Image (tube, grey):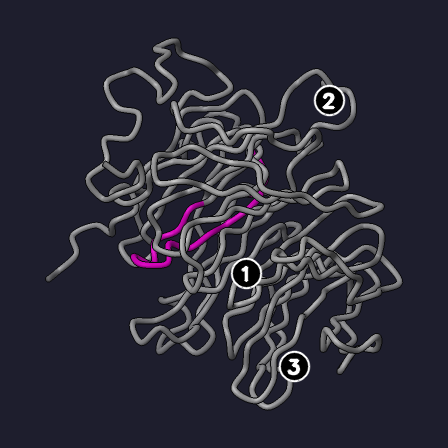
Amino acid sequence: MSLFGATSGFGAAGAGVFGTATTDSHNPMKDVEVTSPPDDSISCLAFSPPTMPGNFLIGGSWANDVRCWEVQDNGQTVPKAQQMHTGPVLDVCWSDDGSKVFTASCDKTAKMWDLNSNQAIQIAQHDGPIKAIHWIKAPSYTCIMTGSWDKTLKFWDTRSQNPMMTLQMPERCYCADVVYPMAVVATADRGLIVYQLENQPSEFRRIDSPLKHQHRCVAIFKDKQNKPTGFALGSIEGRVAIHYINPPNPAKDNFTFKCHRSNGTNTTTPQDIYAVNAISFHPVHGTLATVGSDGRFSFWDKDARTKLKTSEQLDQPITACCFNSNGNIFAYASSYDWSKGHEYYNPQKKNYIFLRNAAEELKPRNKKW
């Protein structure tokens, strides 16, 4: 029986996959631990695209490395390869055919990693750390988009040393997402820019931020026709905004919700408020996961405006998350995010990546068949 199949019991009956029934604060959800995790905080995770057979997971870290694991159907993870930058790796993405992985780093470069030959070559250069990297496949072109703290968005043909195009941004890129033909970039100073990517990339609209605090993560969502129609934006203030690009009724359709706070939404008592570190949409159901500095993940149905599940609290923040291409696996990374400064950093503490069966828990509420 496949561990990530729809019928899987996945760590049920109190016994973890590894046969231990002890409750453990580093893995309170008893999820599968990825073997050989990075040696420093994990900044990003990305699963292989649906064009590839099997499941491969990429993780980038502040130890300057990017690693690849094969995730087998029985839940075992096999480390396959790794590559290095000369600075922390801040973002990773795949080409649509799964043959290449692209990595963005504080060393101001982006690299293309050919998984077949295990060779990595530099394909992009900025004047500051590169915070976001995305593969764009358009009918008339393919390219890599990089967003940097040098306040530029650049588009690269991987065969040329110079960018195809450079777009100036008002501030540093903090996070970005791409679902063709749309890109969205959130910047410092609460900037928010939507780009259209048809024919050639161009700025489509600047949006007043629906959030009052620093932007931390952004993820595009699709409509029933599988077209990008809006985005979810997370901030350091335990809040997510759901924002449609062209809604019939903006005042009604766009909304924000609180999350990753110490005592739910009870506002009568003082709250500890945590950053939303990452947002990921389920590829089948369109529901979403958020992960935070509070060490929890939560699953949400934005259409029913309801929470589907919140995890037990891990003993350190959750810094990254992603779903595999068919939505059966939810990966999340547990490591220190420096949200409480250097005095809370414990170099003895291990970093972890966990895998969870996501087939059932992310089904929308009251779906009308």
Residue 2 vs residue 141: left or right?
A: left
Q: Magenta span covers which residues?
A: 273-289
Residue under label 2: 345
Q: Residue furthest top?
A: 22
Residue annotated with mark 1: 210
The local secondary structure at tag 2 comes to: loop
| Residue toward you, 257 or 54 | 54
Q: Quadrant of residue 311?
A: top left
Identify the amino acid type marked 3. Answer: Glu
| Quadrant location, the N terminus | top left
Quick one: label 3 or label 2, which is nearer the N terminus?
Answer: 3
Q: Secondary structure at mark 1?
A: loop
Q: Is residue 192 magenta?
A: no
Residue at position x 75%, y 73% in the image: 154
Residue in front for this viewpoint, 42 or 252: 42
Q: Quadrant of residue 16?
A: top left
Q: Is residue 155 visible?
A: no
Task: Return the residue found at the far right.
Answer: 127
**Residue 29 image position (x, y, % from top left):** 39, 25
Cα distance, mark 3 to mark 2?
Answer: 40 Å
Residue where numbered disc 3 is placed: 203
Tell me where residue 364 appears, x and y as whole percent: 24, 52
Residue 350, horizontal then vertical, whole percent? 63, 21
> What amino acid type should be assigned to the residue bearing mark 1?
Pro
Whether residue 201 is visible: yes
Q: Secondary structure at mark 3?
A: strand
The residues bearing labels 2 and 1 have C-alpha atoms spaced at a distance of 32 Å
Q: Residue 139, percent across and down?
A: 52, 86
